[in-house]
Image: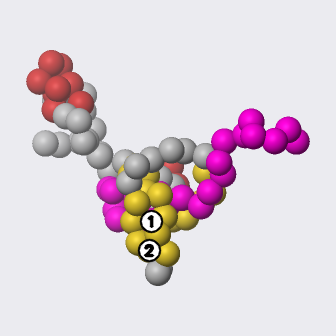
Amino acid sequence: MKKNIHPKYIETLFHDVSNDFKFIIRSTIKTSNTIKFQGKIYPLVKIEISSESHPFYTGKHKIIDTTGRVEKFRRKYGAIGSKTTK
């Protein structure tokens, strides 16, 4: 491999904010946030959905609306045909 052309590959903590699940994986993502976890300081990346909260993996249908997309859709089209309730 050529030297000094590859991004830094370090252990990073990802935090699924929808269910407070945290996991450590090696990544090249750059972040300015850090967190102390299990006695060590890791770069922190906050995510809205992971395999611990995704309906495909959990088998549970759950709406996670952090940016108001569901409410905007309901205002525009109403609740007709919606499988979920308000």
Image quadrant of residue 10? Answer: bottom right
> At x 24% / y 30%, what residue is drawn?
69
Residue 55 percent coordinates (x, y): 44, 50
> At x 32% / y 50%, what residue is drawn?
62
Type of amino acid at the residue the image marks with label 2: Phe
Looking at the picture, does residue 82 appear above or below residue 84?
Answer: above
Give the total number of marks visible in the rendering.
2
Q: Earlier in the sequence, mark 1 or mark 2?
A: 1
Q: Nearer the viewer, residue 70 or 83?
A: 70
Q: Is residue 5 left or right of residue 49?
A: right
Please, what secondary structure does the residue beneath circle 1 have?
strand
Q: Is residue 80 left or right of residue 22?
A: left
Residue 67 percent coordinates (x, y): 23, 36
Which residue is under mark 1?
22
Please, what secondary structure does the residue beneath circle 2 have?
strand
Q: Is residue 55 visible?
A: no
> At x 48% / y 64%, what residue is drawn?
42
CA–CA distance between discs 1 and 2? 9 Å
Q: Nearer the viewer, residue 63 or 30?
A: 30
Please provide the residue range marked out in magenta: 1-22
Pick the quarter of the image with the C terminus.
top left
Pick the quarter of the image with the N terminus.
top right
Which of the numbered marks, if any, corresponds to residue 37?
2
Q: Are marks 1 and 2 in contact (CB under 8 Å)?
A: yes
> At x 54% / y 44%, what residue is drawn?
29
Magenta span has 44?
no
